Protein backbone atom coordinates (compact mmCIF):
# COMPACT_ATOMS: atom_id res chain seq x y z
CA UNK A 1 0.00 0.00 0.00
CA UNK A 2 1.07 3.53 -0.80
CA UNK A 3 2.21 5.61 2.21
CA UNK A 4 -0.52 7.36 4.18
CA UNK A 5 0.67 10.51 5.93
CA UNK A 6 -0.55 12.92 8.58
CA UNK A 7 1.68 15.99 8.27
CA UNK A 8 1.47 18.83 10.77
CA UNK A 9 2.41 22.30 9.60
CA UNK A 10 2.86 24.49 12.65
CA UNK A 11 3.72 27.53 10.51
CA UNK A 12 4.89 30.47 12.69
CA UNK A 13 2.98 29.37 15.79
CA UNK A 14 3.79 28.15 19.31
CA UNK A 15 6.68 28.88 21.63
CA UNK A 16 9.37 26.25 22.02
CA UNK A 17 7.84 25.18 25.33
CA UNK A 18 4.32 24.94 23.93
CA UNK A 19 5.61 23.03 20.93
CA UNK A 20 7.39 20.54 23.14
CA UNK A 21 4.24 20.08 25.25
CA UNK A 22 2.14 19.58 22.13
CA UNK A 23 4.48 16.87 20.87
CA UNK A 24 4.51 15.19 24.29
CA UNK A 25 0.72 15.19 24.38
CA UNK A 26 0.49 13.70 20.89
CA UNK A 27 3.13 11.04 21.58
CA UNK A 28 1.45 10.20 24.90
CA UNK A 29 -1.54 9.01 22.90
CA UNK A 30 0.78 6.18 21.89
CA UNK A 31 -0.61 5.67 18.41
CA UNK A 32 1.28 2.83 16.80
CA UNK A 33 1.67 3.47 13.11
CA UNK A 34 1.69 0.65 10.58
CA UNK A 35 4.60 0.36 8.22
CA UNK A 36 2.75 2.34 5.51
CA UNK A 37 1.67 5.17 7.88
CA UNK A 38 3.73 8.26 8.76
CA UNK A 39 3.27 11.22 11.08
CA UNK A 40 5.43 14.21 10.13
CA UNK A 41 5.84 17.44 12.09
CA UNK A 42 6.89 20.50 10.08
CA UNK A 43 8.07 22.84 12.81
CA UNK A 44 9.92 26.18 12.94
CA UNK A 45 13.69 25.87 12.43
CA UNK A 46 14.66 26.45 16.11
CA UNK A 47 12.48 23.49 17.16
CA UNK A 48 13.82 20.96 14.66
CA UNK A 49 16.41 19.30 16.87
CA UNK A 50 14.00 19.09 19.79
CA UNK A 51 11.32 17.61 17.53
CA UNK A 52 13.73 15.15 15.96
CA UNK A 53 14.82 13.88 19.35
CA UNK A 54 11.23 13.73 20.68
CA UNK A 55 10.17 11.43 17.84
CA UNK A 56 13.44 9.53 17.45
CA UNK A 57 12.29 6.38 19.25
CA UNK A 58 8.85 6.30 17.65
CA UNK A 59 8.33 4.24 14.55
CA UNK A 60 7.41 6.35 11.50
CA UNK A 61 7.24 9.70 13.29
CA UNK A 62 9.48 12.38 11.73
CA UNK A 63 10.48 16.01 12.04
CA UNK A 64 10.34 18.21 8.93
CA UNK A 65 11.46 21.70 8.03
CA UNK A 66 8.88 24.10 6.61
CA UNK A 67 11.25 25.44 3.98
CA UNK A 68 14.85 25.52 2.76
CA UNK A 69 16.71 27.97 0.57
CA UNK A 70 16.99 27.49 -3.19
CA UNK A 71 20.76 28.13 -3.22
CA UNK A 72 23.31 25.67 -1.93
CA UNK A 73 25.14 28.05 0.44
CA UNK A 74 26.56 31.53 0.61
CA UNK A 75 25.74 35.12 1.44
CA UNK A 76 22.00 34.75 2.16
CA UNK A 77 21.61 36.20 5.62
CA UNK A 78 18.89 34.58 7.66
CA UNK A 79 18.38 31.64 5.32
CA UNK A 80 18.74 27.90 5.96
CA UNK A 81 20.08 25.43 3.39
CA UNK A 82 19.08 21.85 2.69
CA UNK A 83 22.64 20.84 3.60
CA UNK A 84 22.20 22.41 7.06
CA UNK A 85 18.96 20.48 7.56
CA UNK A 86 20.70 17.27 6.55
CA UNK A 87 23.50 17.98 9.01
CA UNK A 88 21.02 17.95 11.91
CA UNK A 89 19.37 14.74 10.77
CA UNK A 90 16.25 16.13 9.07
CA UNK A 91 14.79 13.93 6.34
CA UNK A 92 11.71 15.86 5.23
CA UNK A 93 11.11 19.43 4.09
CA UNK A 94 7.98 21.25 2.94
CA UNK A 95 8.66 22.95 -0.39
CA UNK A 96 6.48 25.52 -2.11
CA UNK A 97 3.78 26.13 0.45
CA UNK A 98 1.32 28.67 -0.98
CA UNK A 99 2.15 31.13 1.81
CA UNK A 100 5.78 31.12 0.72
CA UNK A 101 4.82 31.39 -2.93
CA UNK A 102 2.67 34.40 -2.06
CA UNK A 103 4.66 36.25 0.61
CA UNK A 104 8.18 35.29 -0.47
CA UNK A 105 7.76 35.32 -4.22
CA UNK A 106 8.69 31.68 -4.68
CA UNK A 107 8.36 30.66 -8.32
CA UNK A 108 8.04 27.21 -9.86
CA UNK A 109 11.64 27.53 -11.11
CA UNK A 110 12.97 28.34 -7.62
CA UNK A 111 11.04 25.39 -6.25
CA UNK A 112 12.67 23.10 -8.82
CA UNK A 113 16.04 24.20 -7.38
CA UNK A 114 14.84 23.56 -3.82
CA UNK A 115 13.60 20.11 -4.75
CA UNK A 116 17.00 19.29 -6.32
CA UNK A 117 18.88 20.46 -3.22
CA UNK A 118 16.59 18.38 -1.02
CA UNK A 119 17.35 15.25 -3.03
CA UNK A 120 21.09 16.03 -2.99
CA UNK A 121 20.83 16.03 0.79
CA UNK A 122 18.66 12.94 1.21
CA UNK A 123 15.67 15.03 2.20
CA UNK A 124 12.24 14.06 0.91
CA UNK A 125 10.35 17.13 -0.30
CA UNK A 126 6.71 17.58 0.69
CA UNK A 127 5.88 19.51 -2.45
CA UNK A 128 2.83 21.79 -2.22
CA UNK A 129 0.62 22.77 -5.13
CA UNK A 130 -2.84 24.26 -5.36
CA UNK A 131 -4.85 26.97 -7.03
CA UNK A 132 -6.17 30.35 -5.81
CA UNK A 133 -9.90 31.03 -5.68
CA UNK A 134 -10.01 32.96 -8.96
CA UNK A 135 -8.59 29.98 -10.85
CA UNK A 136 -11.08 27.60 -9.22
CA UNK A 137 -13.92 29.93 -10.14
CA UNK A 138 -12.68 30.04 -13.71
CA UNK A 139 -12.57 26.24 -13.72
CA UNK A 140 -8.93 26.06 -14.85
CA UNK A 141 -7.53 24.48 -11.68
CA UNK A 142 -6.38 21.31 -13.42
CA UNK A 143 -4.06 23.01 -15.88
CA UNK A 144 -2.86 25.37 -13.12
CA UNK A 145 -1.74 22.59 -10.79
CA UNK A 146 -0.42 20.46 -13.66
CA UNK A 147 1.87 23.37 -14.61
CA UNK A 148 3.10 23.59 -11.00
CA UNK A 149 4.12 19.92 -11.12
CA UNK A 150 5.57 20.16 -14.61
CA UNK A 151 7.71 23.23 -13.91
CA UNK A 152 9.02 22.18 -10.51
CA UNK A 153 9.15 18.38 -10.63
CA UNK A 154 9.14 16.89 -14.10
CA UNK A 155 12.86 17.34 -14.64
CA UNK A 156 13.36 14.63 -12.01
CA UNK A 157 14.15 11.08 -13.06
CA UNK A 158 11.52 8.46 -12.16
CA UNK A 159 13.57 6.98 -9.31
CA UNK A 160 13.70 10.39 -7.61
CA UNK A 161 10.12 11.58 -8.14
CA UNK A 162 8.92 8.22 -6.82
CA UNK A 163 10.18 9.31 -3.39
CA UNK A 164 8.32 12.60 -3.27
CA UNK A 165 5.28 13.53 -1.21
CA UNK A 166 2.82 15.88 -2.90
CA UNK A 167 0.35 18.03 -0.98
CA UNK A 168 -2.55 19.46 -2.94
CA UNK A 169 -3.77 22.53 -1.05
CA UNK A 170 -6.38 24.73 -2.69
CA UNK A 171 -5.49 28.22 -1.45
CA UNK A 172 -9.15 29.08 -0.90
CA UNK A 173 -9.38 26.29 1.66
CA UNK A 174 -6.27 27.15 3.71
CA UNK A 175 -7.09 28.56 7.13
CA UNK A 176 -10.56 29.53 5.94
CA UNK A 177 -12.58 26.68 7.42
CA UNK A 178 -13.76 26.06 3.84
CA UNK A 179 -12.73 22.51 2.95
CA UNK A 180 -12.83 21.07 -0.54
CA UNK A 181 -15.58 18.49 -0.78
CA UNK A 182 -14.50 14.89 -0.94
CA UNK A 183 -15.58 14.89 -4.61
CA UNK A 184 -13.44 17.96 -5.39
CA UNK A 185 -10.46 16.48 -3.53
CA UNK A 186 -10.75 13.05 -5.14
CA UNK A 187 -11.22 14.52 -8.60
CA UNK A 188 -8.11 16.69 -8.56
CA UNK A 189 -5.97 14.13 -6.74
CA UNK A 190 -6.90 11.59 -9.38
CA UNK A 191 -6.12 14.13 -12.07
CA UNK A 192 -2.67 14.80 -10.56
CA UNK A 193 -1.99 11.09 -10.56
CA UNK A 194 -2.86 10.82 -14.26
CA UNK A 195 -0.57 13.78 -15.06
CA UNK A 196 2.28 11.96 -13.31
CA UNK A 197 1.38 8.67 -15.02
CA UNK A 198 1.43 10.36 -18.45
CA UNK A 199 4.86 11.86 -17.79
CA UNK A 200 6.39 8.82 -16.06
CA UNK A 201 4.33 5.64 -15.67
CA UNK A 202 1.32 4.26 -13.83
CA UNK A 203 3.54 2.52 -11.33
CA UNK A 204 5.40 5.74 -10.47
CA UNK A 205 2.10 7.60 -10.11
CA UNK A 206 0.69 4.83 -7.94
CA UNK A 207 3.59 5.07 -5.51
CA UNK A 208 3.40 8.80 -4.78
CA UNK A 209 1.38 9.88 -1.75
CA UNK A 210 -0.83 12.88 -2.51
CA UNK A 211 -1.98 14.63 0.66
CA UNK A 212 -4.89 17.02 0.86
CA UNK A 213 -4.46 20.30 2.75
CA UNK A 214 -6.84 23.12 3.56
CA UNK A 215 -8.94 23.10 6.73
CA UNK A 216 -8.45 19.43 7.50
CA UNK A 217 -10.01 18.96 10.94
CA UNK A 218 -10.63 16.12 13.38
CA UNK A 219 -14.21 15.89 12.14
CA UNK A 220 -13.57 15.77 8.38
CA UNK A 221 -10.24 13.90 8.15
CA UNK A 222 -11.72 10.42 7.99
CA UNK A 223 -14.06 11.31 5.15
CA UNK A 224 -11.36 13.10 3.14
CA UNK A 225 -8.81 10.32 3.70
CA UNK A 226 -11.35 7.72 2.60
CA UNK A 227 -11.04 8.98 -1.00
CA UNK A 228 -8.97 6.46 -2.98
CA UNK A 229 -6.49 9.09 -4.20
CA UNK A 230 -6.20 11.07 -0.95
CA UNK A 231 -3.31 9.69 1.08
CA UNK A 232 -3.59 11.78 4.23
CA UNK A 233 -3.33 15.48 4.96
CA UNK A 234 -1.10 18.49 5.45
CA UNK A 235 -2.68 20.16 8.44
CA UNK A 236 -2.22 23.70 9.75
CA UNK A 237 -4.65 24.96 12.41
CA UNK A 238 -5.81 21.56 13.65
CA UNK A 239 -2.22 20.37 14.09
CA UNK A 240 -1.77 22.87 16.93
CA UNK A 241 -4.29 21.08 19.16
CA UNK A 242 -3.14 17.70 20.47
CA UNK A 243 -6.58 16.02 20.59
CA UNK A 244 -7.36 17.16 17.07
CA UNK A 245 -4.12 16.02 15.51
CA UNK A 246 -4.37 12.70 17.36
CA UNK A 247 -7.74 12.12 15.70
CA UNK A 248 -6.27 13.09 12.34
CA UNK A 249 -3.44 10.57 12.71
CA UNK A 250 -6.01 7.95 13.67
CA UNK A 251 -8.03 8.76 10.55
CA UNK A 252 -5.23 7.52 8.24
CA UNK A 253 -6.10 4.53 6.07
P1 LIG B 1 -5.03 24.80 7.51
O1 LIG B 1 -3.59 24.95 6.80
O2 LIG B 1 -5.16 23.35 7.91
O3 LIG B 1 -4.96 25.72 8.70
O4 LIG B 1 -6.04 25.20 6.51
C1 LIG B 1 -3.12 23.97 5.92
C2 LIG B 1 -1.77 24.38 5.38
O5 LIG B 1 -1.57 25.57 5.07
O6 LIG B 1 -0.86 23.54 5.22
Image (cartoon, rainbow, N blue to C red):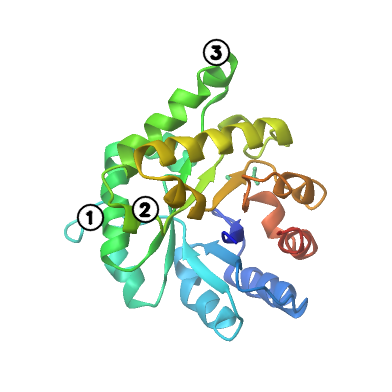
Q: Position of residue 114 (x, y in %)?
A: 30, 52
**Quadrant in which residue 108 is drawn:** top left
**188 relative position to 70: left or right:** right
- Image quadrant containing the C terminus: bottom right
- Disc 1 CB within 8 Å of nearest ligand 1 atom: no
Residue at point 53%, 33% (across, down): 191
On the image, numbered disc 1 is attached to which residue?
76
Is residue 111 something one can see in this rendering? yes
Query: Measured from the top left, where is residue 157 in percent x and y?
Result: 27, 52
Q: Is residue 27 above or below residue 161?
A: below
Residue at the extreme left: 74
Rendered-image quadrant of the N terminus? bottom right
* Disc 3 Cβ-to-ligand 1 distance below 8 Å: no
The residue at the point 73 percent across, 61 percent down is: 245
The picture places residue 160, in percent across and down from the top left corner, at 33, 57
Q: Nearer the viewer, mark 1 or mark 3?
A: 3
Give yes or no for contact between labels 1 and 2 (Cβ–Cβ under 8 Å). Answer: no
Image disc number at residue 138: 3
| Residue at the (71%, 49%) spot, across then down | 225
Per the image, the residue denoted by label 2 is 161
Amino acid sequence: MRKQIAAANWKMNLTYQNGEKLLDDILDANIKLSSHQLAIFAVPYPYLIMTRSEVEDEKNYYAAAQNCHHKRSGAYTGEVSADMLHSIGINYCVVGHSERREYNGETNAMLADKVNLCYENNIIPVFCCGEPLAIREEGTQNSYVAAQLRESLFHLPAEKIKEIIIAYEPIWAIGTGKTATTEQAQEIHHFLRTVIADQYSESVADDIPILYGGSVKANNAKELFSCPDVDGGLVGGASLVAEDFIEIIKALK
